[in-house]
Amino acid sequence: MREIKFKIYCEFVLNGKLHKSMESPASWFLLSQSGELWEYGPLSAPQPINRRLYKKTIPLQYTGRKDMNGCEIYESDLVNYRCKGSLIEGEIYQASGCWKIKDRRGGNVMYLYKASSLEIIGNKYGA
């Protein structure tokens, strides 16, 4: 059985500047069964996301697979993969209950089944 976990892409304001990150400034997140995000810290109880601080929060699900370097592959990760002798850049996404890779140039789609041939090169949010 695959482990179900998430990482959170967030945009937050700190000292008057907008930051884009996969980490929050000083909090952790809880994701409810209804998909609602809550934040908490080492000395604070869980509470709904502070929308004045967090401008955007997006949970990204773990695919259950790792790339050729042993890095966990998450939704919205950008990967390089070889297809018919060409090196192609694609984006990981979920559709119809399956993890897929969409070629960022041509829009072709393939199923994510052989993760050992993929290499993560970033994510679509640039964080």
Image: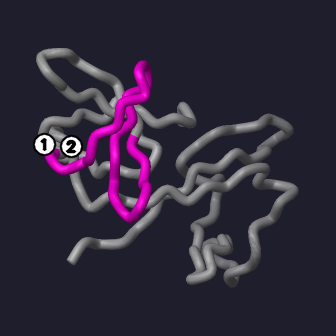
Does the magenta-highlighted stretch encompass residue 110? yes
* Residue 46, x across and y down, in percent: 68, 81
Magenta stretch bounds: 92-114
Question: Is residue 44 depicted above or below 86 in this figure?
Answer: below
User: Quadrant of the rendered structure where residue 18 is?
Assistant: top right
Return the residue nearer the eye: 104 or 11. 104
Q: Which residue is mark 1?
A: 116
User: Quadrant of the rendered structure where residue 108 is?
Assistant: top left
Q: Quadrant of the C terminus?
A: top right
* Identity, as a three-letter code, of the amino acid under mark 1: Ser
* Residue 103, x across and y down, in percent: 37, 28
Residue farthest along the top direction in this orientation:
86
The residue shown at (43%, 48%) is 93
Q: For numbered disc 2, what is the local secondary structure?
A: loop
* Residue 81, x across and y down, in percent: 22, 29
Q: Which residue is mark 2?
A: 67
